[in-house]
């Protein structure tokens, strides 16, 4: 039986990882209580927030999701002293996750590249990084389940699918979406250079309804929000979970994981929006906040039995923080490319992420950003001092003849890329996360000798008359590594089922467990790990 303060399984976080595990448990007959730090909002509210935001602040799509004081999430334009995330090191680990019911799938692009078998054996094949604790064949069935659970569309032609190595045991549930005019032209251009721009697999309904959601209508508003819910987001699943019996607590910030004398998890403590503390008990606990909030919570939960923090006998909680460091080539072309029809990310060059060179430097994935250009180029046109018809003509020209090509790099797990607790406090008096981060020489060498030359070659082949390259590495908002997986409890936090080595009834699934992230977006792998963990939890609950 579930109540407001107890359940069989307590899940902290309501993003995609928490949602898919909750549904597995509900279907197996277990009571589930989900706790969310932020509020619950409707899609209409988010759409109106974005529609009514002044153009001058729309460079940051997080403005559609204003923070609540008790559940701050990173927002662009903050003063360093006011920012939620604190940074040290040569590269900033800035993120834009959403602490709302439904999590960051509210504003993701839906991109769902699988890892390759090679991505999971970096150390064995290339002598760098870590190997995963299991192989691709173990993960592959969970990728299929993820593709059907989220509604991921993709190409039926095997030569256009990713990865090319490793088996695929089932087709995508929906066909790939068509390319925009810009992507068609880009694909033709890079083909002359020997590169294949292939359709991205993406959690978006292509030409048909799926799972109660409508087909994509190509409005190009995937980020910050799909206004029609054609793109998967976890918020749409919450209604179904509640009908199945899940209890959802919102505006409830978990700040402590409590252990008992046997070092099992006994409960979690949370503050409501009035700063009042409450306690929730259960048989089994799942931390599904995200790869940054999970380690922060574990470190805050230190006690006499766990002086370094819960699940942290290895001293690896908060270490090995990863993302996909990206550099952008903004090109102005002679002929129009016309970005902006269809999804914002719809294709990519993945083959450049693979090769024996990975023993020396990172791989990189190149994508043509299919975001409509009008918002970006308007700022540039205004800076030229144009008005009236001249301004209108310049916006039209630049919207047609500019494009962004992004090179996203893989990064190795490094224990020095570490999240710790800052001495600065948030509104509730809880420590803010502080992250020391350096993309490392593995990435920098790739940029110098591999990805930058390829990006320039592509830009020139597109007929670029101007190329502007971003001056620093930007994060892709793919949080990985802070609760890393491994078979050895001395150098990892969770086992092959994302169960904490230190606590038999605590699971920490998702991106934090990933031992390597390769170049593609992390959400499909996070969700596959969640489904695998869900199977283990259901099995464990049978004997509880």
Image: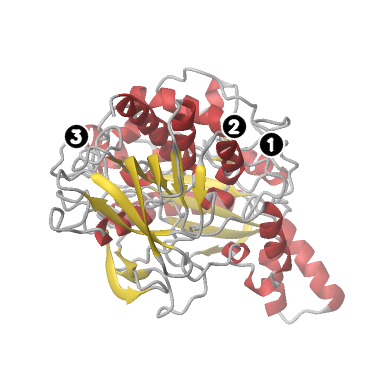
Q: Quadrant of the C terminus?
A: top left
| Crowd tier of the residue under label 1, counting other residues whose Cα lies within 10 Å: few below 14, some 14–19, many 20 or above | some
| Crowd tier of the residue under label 3, counting other residues whose Cα lies within 10 Å: few below 14, some 14–19, many 20 or above | some
C-alpha separation, residue under disc 2 versus residue under disc 3:
32 Å
**Which residue: 59% across, 62% down?**
65
Residue 333, label in figure = none
Q: Secondary structure at mark 2?
A: loop
Q: Nearer the viewer, residue 80 or 229?
A: 229
**Which residue: 49% across, 64% down?**
470
Query: Which residue extends farthest right?
Result: 389
| Crowd tier of the residue under label 2, counting other residues whose Cα lies within 10 Å: few below 14, some 14–19, many 20 or above | many
Q: Is residue 21 above or below residue 461?
A: above
Q: Which residue is mark 1?
A: 213
The mark nearer the N terminus, 2 or 3, is 2
Q: Are marks 1 and 2 in contact (CB under 8 Å)?
A: yes
**Which residue: 49% across, 58% down?**
99
């Amino acid at each position: 039986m579930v109540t407001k303060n107890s359940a069989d399984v307590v899940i902290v976080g309501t993003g995609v990882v928490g949602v898919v595990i909750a549904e597995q448990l509900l279907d197996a007959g277990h009571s589930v209580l989900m706790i969310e730090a932020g509020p619950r909002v409707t899609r209409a509210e988010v759409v109106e927030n974005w529609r009514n935001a002044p153009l001058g602040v729309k460079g940051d799509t997080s403005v559609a999701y204003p923070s609540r004081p008790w559940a701050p999430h990173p927002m662009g334009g903050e003063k360093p002293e006011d920012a939620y995330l604190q940074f040290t090191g040569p590269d900033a680990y800035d993120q834009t996750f959403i602490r709302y019911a439904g999590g960051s799938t509210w504003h993701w692009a839906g991109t769902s590249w699988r890892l390759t078998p090679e991505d999971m054996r970096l150390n064995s094949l290339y002598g760098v990084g870590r190997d995963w604790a299991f192989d691709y064949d173990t993960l592959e069935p969970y990728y299929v389940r993820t593709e059907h659970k989220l509604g991921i569309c993709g190409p039926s032609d095997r030569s256009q699918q990713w990865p090319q190595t490793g088996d695929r045991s089932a087709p995508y549930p929906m066909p790939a979406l068509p390319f925009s005019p810009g992507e068609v032209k880009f694909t033709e251009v890079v083909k002359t250079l020997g590169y294949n721009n292939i359709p991205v697999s993406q959690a978006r309904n292509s030409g048909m309804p799926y799972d109660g959601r409508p087909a994509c209508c190509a409005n190009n508003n995937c980020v910050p929000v799909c206004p029609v819910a054609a793109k998967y987001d976890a918020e749409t699943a919450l209604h179904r979970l509640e009908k199945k019996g899940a209890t959802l607590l919102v505006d409830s910030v978990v700040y402590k994981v409590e252990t008992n004398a046997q070092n099992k998890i006994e409960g979690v403590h949370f503050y409501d929006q009035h700063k009042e503390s409450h306690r929730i008990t259960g048989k089994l606990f799942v931390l599904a906040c995200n790869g940054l909030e999970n380690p922060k919570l574990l470190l805050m939960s230190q006690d006499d039995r766990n002086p370094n923090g819960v699940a942290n006998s290895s001293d690896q909680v908060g270490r090995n923080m990863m993302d996909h460091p990206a550099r952008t080539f903004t090109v102005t072309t002679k002929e129009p490319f016309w970005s902006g029809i269809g999804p914002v990310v719809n294709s990519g060059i993945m083959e450049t992420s693979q090769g024996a060179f990975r023993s020396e430097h990172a791989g990189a994935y190149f994508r043509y950003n299919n975001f409509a250009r009008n918002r970006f180029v308007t700022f540039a046109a205004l800076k030229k001092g144009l008005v009236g018809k001249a301004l209108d003509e310049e916006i039209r020209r630049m919207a047609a003849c500019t494009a962004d090509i992004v090179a996203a790099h893989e990064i190795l797990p490094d224990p020095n890329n570490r999240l710790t607790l800052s001495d600065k406090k948030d509104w509730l008096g809880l420590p803010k996360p502080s992250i020391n981060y350096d993309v490392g020489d593995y990435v920098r060498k790739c940029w110098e000798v591999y990805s930058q030359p390829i990006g320039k070659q592509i830009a020139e082949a597109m007929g670029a008359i101007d190329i502007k390259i971003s001056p620093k590495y930007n994060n892709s908002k793919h949080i990985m590594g802070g609760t890393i997986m491994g078979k050895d409890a001395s150098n990892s936090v969770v086992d092959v089922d994302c169960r904490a080595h230190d606590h038999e009834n605590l699971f920490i699934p998702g991106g934090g467990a990933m031992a390597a992230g390769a170049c593609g977006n992390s959400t499909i792998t996070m969700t596959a790990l969640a489904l695998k963990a869900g199977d283990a939890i259901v099995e464990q609950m049978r004997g509880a």
